[in-house]
Image: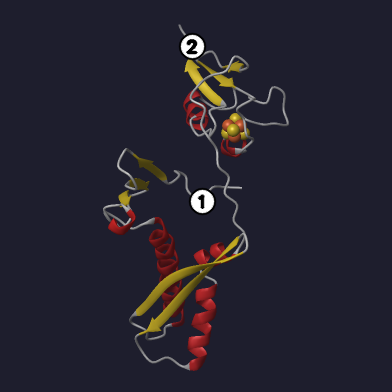
Amino acid sequence: MTYKFEKPIHAEIGTERFKVSIEWRNGTLIADEPVANGGKDLGPDPFTLLLSSLASCTLATLRMYIDHKGWDVPELKVNVNMFQQTKGEEVFTIIDRDIHFSSNITEEQRNKLLEVAGKCPISKLLKGTTDIRTYLYHEETSDKKINYTNGEITVEWTPDFCKHSGRCVMGLPTVFDINKKPWINMQGADTAAIIAQVDKCPTGALKYHYNKK
Ligand code: SF4
């Protein structure tokens, strides 16, 4: 299992309600809510961001396919919208995607492009099964921690905080290996690599400090 992004999408909110700063790999964007909902409309709202993802993925996928085929379709447009229906306890979300080609294409091409749009990665993600694992970071330390050292730093592991995300084992298997005893091998990587991995622990079960000389 490998994460899609080396650096996760990072978002922060201050005291200003709804205004969220989102860091992505090449910059920052603001998400907000419309004025009618109490925001300042400084950026797209979360639903708009979600639908934008589908719109952009659809068009990029179609463009790649059209170019690969050498078809003459200079412009593609898409409108995406959604509505929700409640049935009993369940909420059903229906997303409508309307695609428009600027040039005449055959019925056969149209059907093929419809099929290709249905297979764009975000379509598959939205139609597939998604789970959201949520972790809370513990700033505090615990008395029940177990220490591992390489002489330069000490890594503290608090079993009570560990939610077995597997992030450390995936990220640095030469150091973190649950099939070995001890499961943290401080000689398995250099100090910088260990620190970088410890900083990615989502729960604070892993922390480190430099040893006093
Ligand atoms: S990254 Fe942290 S929470 Fe996840 S398995 Fe490792 S120690 Fe546990």
Instruction: For the C terminus, give its image quadrant.
Output: top left
Q: How far apart, in angstroms, are the residues tagged by discs 2 and 1?
A: 34 Å
Residue 118's disc number: none
**Residue 181, x across and y down, in percent:** 72, 23
Quadrant of the rendered image containing residue 63: bottom left
In this view, the residue in front, 139 or 175, is 139
User: Label 1's element?
Assistant: loop
Q: What residue is drawn where x is 55% and y is 32%?
A: 203
Residue 4's disc number: 1
Ligand 1 shown in quarter: top right
- In the rendered image, the residue lying farthest to the top is 213
Q: What residue is drawn where x is 57% and y is 49%?
A: 132
Q: Indicate how the structure is coloured in the image.
A: secondary structure
Is the C-beta separation of discs 2 and 1 under 8 Å? no
Residue 211's disc number: 2
Q: In this view, does 61 lie above or below 75?
A: above
User: Label 2's element?
Assistant: loop
Quadrant of the rendered image containing residue 16: top left
Amino acid, disc 2: Asn
In this view, the residue in front, 207 or 188, is 207
Q: Residues within 10 Å of mark 2 (few under 14, many from 20)?
A: few
